[in-house]
Each structure stands twice: as C-alpha cells, then as structure tokens.
Image: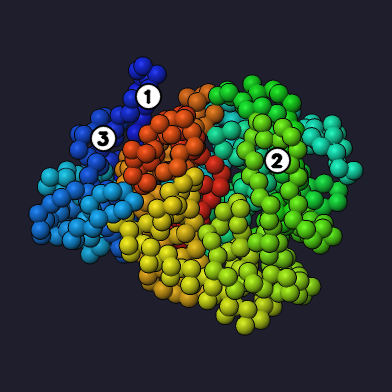
Amino acid sequence: MLAAGLLVLFVSESKGGKDVIMNEGSPTTPTDSIVQPSAAPAAQPEVGTKVKVDQVGYGTKHTKLAIVEGEYPAEASFALIDAVSGEQVFTGILTDPIQDEASQQVVRHADFSEFQTSGVYQIAVEGAGNSYPFEIGDNPYQAALATIMRSYTLQRAGVDIDDPITGLKQKAGHTQDAKAEIFFDDGVSHKGAVIDVSGGWYDAGDYGKYIPPAAVTVAQIMLAYDLNPGAFPMGQLKLPEGLQSLEKQQSMPDVLAEVKVELEWMLRMQRADGAVYHKVSGAEWTGFVTPDTDTQTRYVFGLTSYGTAQFVGAAALGARIYKPFDHEFSEMLLAAAEKAQSFLTANPSALFRQDPGQDNGSGGYGKTTDTEERLWALAELFRTTGDIKYSDTLTKQFDFLLKRSPQAVNWGNTQLLGQWAYYNAEKTEDQWKVMIRKAITSRADELIVQTEADGYLNTLKLTEYTWASVKTGAANGCLLMIANVMQPNETYEAAALEQLHHVFGRSATGYSYVTGIGSRFPVVPHHRINSSTGVLIPGLVVGGPNRYGGDPDLDRVKDKLAPAKAYLDVRGSYSSNEYAIDYNAPVVLLASFFIE
C-alpha cells in the first residue's frame, strides 16, 4: 500500500515505441512502511503542472512552501484543501514574483507554514490549478527513507530474489564473479588469475561493481545511522525471504545488515599487499537483459590509490559502527583498513592504473589525484583507533585540506568526510576543530546565498545542472546539516530541507526524482533490471536535469530546455535518467536528519 500522500505514476501499454504516462488519482491511507507502485486513475491535466510541492509531504512544524509558476495578479491568493473532504482549511497570499534563471520561469511562493494539522492536502491557485496531494505529519519521510534503502536489497548481485512487495523475481546474477579473472599483470597481480569478488550491489543501471561509489555510498549510509539510529529500526526493510538470515542471526538493524553485504564485497576486492582493485565487470556492455543471462567472463580491472584510500575510510568507519553488533566483522574491517593504509604509506604518489579495454564494458570512475581520499582514510583511522601516528601524518601532509571549504561528498571528493571524522575524533586538538568548523560553515553560508537567490530554493548553480544534479543538491543539503550539527543555525536546517523537497517533486520539471515515490516519478529509468523484468523497483534516485546532455536522446533537445528542466524520463537518457547507488546515498542521509 502507499503511504499517505505518496501517489504514483504508472506506465500504460507502449504506443509507437514510446511509453505513455498516466497520472495518479486520490490519496490513500498508510498501512505499510514500504512505498510501492500502484495503479491509479488518470488525473486532470492541470494537477501538478503549475503548482509544485514536495509530493511526499512536510513536517508539521517545518517551513512549508509550494512553488507556483506563471503570471498572476498582485495579491493573488492560494488555498490549502483537505484532499479527503475537499474543504478549504487555510488561505494565504502568494509572494511577489521571482524570475528564476535556472527554470526560466516566473515563480511565486505559497507559504502555509502556519498550518500544522496532520492530514493529506493540496494547494489550489486560481488560474494554476491544484498541486499533487501531499502529507502533513510529524514524520512524513519514514516510508520514503525505508523505500530508498530497500532498493539496495533489490540491487544485490549473486542471489536469487523473490520479493512479494514489488513482485521482482529473478535468478542470481553474475555468479561467475566468484571466479573473476584479473585483467592485468603488475608483478603482484597476475593476468588471468582467478579470484572471488562475488556479492555486493550492482552500481547503477548497468551490472558493474565499482569501489569509489561503493565506498562513499556505504559511508554516507553508516553516517546516517551513526547520527540518528532511531531512523533505522529493526525490521524496517521487510527483507524478502532468503535474504533475512543476516539480520536475524546477528540482531542488527536492517540498514546495517544491508550495508554489510556491500562491505563484504569490498573486502574481497583487497589484494594481499593491501591495495584495492578498482572495479568488476564484463569486457563489453550488456544489453537490457536480466543479470543471470549475462554470462560473459567477468574481469577485475584497475587499481587506484584514491580508491584504496576510500576503502580505508569506509572500512575504518565500519569498524566503529559494527562493533556493538558483530565484533568479529568489526575487527576484520579494521585490519583491512590498516593493511590498505600501509600500502598507501609505502606508495605516497597518486596511482590510477588504466589498461587498454578497461572501460569498454563499464564506467571509468577515473581520477588522478588522491589527497582528499588520503585525508579521509587517516581521519577515520585516527577516530577509530586513537593512534596519534595517523593524526601526525594527517596534520603534516593534509593540514591545508582541514582548513579548506569542502565540496559536497561525491565519489571523486571525500574531503568533507575526512573533516567530519577528524572533527569528531576524541583526541583532536581544539585548534583543528575550530578550523574545520569555520571551513564547513563558510561553505554552508555560500550555499545559503545560492538558495536565497533561486526561485526553487535550490543550492545548484546553473553550471551544476549536469550529471547527477539531484545527487549534488541532496549532498549539499547534507553539508548544510553537518554544518548545523557543528554550529546550530536554523537557516542551515531550513535550507537543507528545501533540497529534500526538490528531490521529492517540488522541482521545475514537476518530477519526484525517485521511482515509486510521489505522484509523478520516473517510470522508464535507464536500468537493466527494470527493462528486462518489467518491474519498476521503488526507491531509485535518478540523475536529474543535465543541461549538457551526454546521451543521444537528451542531446537532441537539451538546447531547447532550461537548465533545471533538461531531464527526460526515457530509457535511453542515461545522462539524466539513470540510477546509481551513490545517487541514493545522500538522499538517505539527508532524509534521516528529519526523522523524529
């Protein structure tokens, strides 16, 4: 069943090779903690086209804004309508018009923050129609958070999946990963040697598995648990039969049981000298087939210092998180982290091995620097072990990064994770904490300025509507909340929440950028499991608006679209409509801050 206010789109029969999208109907009462797609009658055309809301909902005590597009008379009013009774329960006046550069729209805001009664509602504006329904409640994001986390379970490689909630039923895919072949020879690794790199999650719409996005993904999810464990109760994910044994045997929250699946795969990617391989995939891109039918040989490609450092950071963080639940696994993670750090110490120069043919069937995830990642590795080891040698090395070699304003966390830059870990280490000197806090809050202040200048209250600059723009916006929200933890500021928290609203449908396109969540969401993502099985897995965050394109479908129209509207819900638009595990991660972290 759907949670209150969580309505869906679904795909009708294909006509002329294109999927015809049909809209939602009326809201339903929550009876389950997992959001799942459901058929619904067609809505009137004007619903949701001019009045944009967070299609999940708003906290009762949080700021509540709708975005209204178009020209309206001065002092134009709006009304809040009870979606069940149809009664008008609140009215207000739209703000003055704002010319929004990113969407190339004139917009106004409808502020209904004063209204704090739980229920399901719509915003109505004369001449603009109604918004999609949404919930007002104390914890509107609980079901969405569980749904997004649960999608990782359905991305598992090497296991049979028979899921009664979504209807996904598929055989174990890429079991040949248990006998993958090394692709290169460097004197330590030998070309053609067979190793077991089975398990883990498929990275995205393809069937590759990559260390950099894996590391930043598990790190952000573990950080979410660390900061708010109450957001992740036992039994939350309703794991399918056959995939529950880990959680039951070890009595750990579902979220940690699921992350452990990925960490175990990462451990298999470490070789004897401590270095960590880059990725696992076939030598050619697969078609849109089920994972069990892709039987090509799988290879272990590449080796990088920045990926090895990210492995250290994630494993050292995991050693702390899992210690209360699985002491043996915690010790295993710490030993692996220290072994990888020994490799990095012995190899101080940045290393990115690139062999011909390495990227013919998988993403590159290339980077030729590693300073931000080495910072994170040392900071997590210092926080976990308290060993001063890690702090001494960090402050001597990477002190400039501790003082520098960070980017939002992404697979190519983990500086913020390093600053956060060092800031919270028990033995970190106060002078460094002051510098780190200043660096992070100064970046938060820059994001506030950008948010206030944007008609949709987004943190993204025009140039940032590129690959994974939705992920970047959510990750900026996480940075704002980390700044808020360090130096409480209501403005930081409010701006962070605005970024979550954008993810869930208060967007220029009118899309919630998460499958199965909201009233209008992607129904044909670039996702092989969805395409080959016909099952739309709920909880997949897609890339979102990308003004620069990068695939044939979007390239044909991108120059006609505003930056914030350069998005296509078509299968071929992998530059705007593909999912990835690291797109989900900051949304998990950001939503967790707002779970009571």
Residue 512: give x, y in percent of width and height: 37, 43
Colour mode of the rendering: rainbow
* Residue with the mark numbered 1: 19
Residue at screen point 90% across, 43% down: 187
Residue ranking furthest to the right: 187
Name the mark nearer the viewer: 2 or 3. Answer: 2
Q: Which of marks 1 and 3 is nearer the N terminus?
A: 1
Q: Earlier in the sequence, mark 2 or mark 1?
A: 1
Res. 426 image quadrant: bottom right
Q: Which mark is residue 25?
A: 3
Report how far apart the C-alphas of labels 2 and 1 lie in the structure: 34 Å
Q: Image height check: is 534 above or below 58?
A: above
Res. 294 image quadrant: top right
Can the viewer see residue 510 in this picture? yes
Q: Image height check: is 405 above or below 280?
A: below
Q: Is mark 2 on a helix, strand or loop?
A: strand
Report how far apart the C-alphas of labels 2 and 3 lie in the structure: 43 Å
Q: How crowded is mark 2: few (under 14 residues within 10 Å), some or many (20 or more)?
A: many
Residue type at mark 2: give it. Lys
Q: In this view, does 242 lie to the left or right of 18?
A: right
Q: Residues within 10 Å of mark 1 (few under 14, many from 20)?
A: some
* Residue with the mark numbered 2: 279
Residue type at mark 3: give it. Gly
Name the mark nearer the viewer: 1 or 3. Answer: 1
Q: What element carries label 1?
A: loop
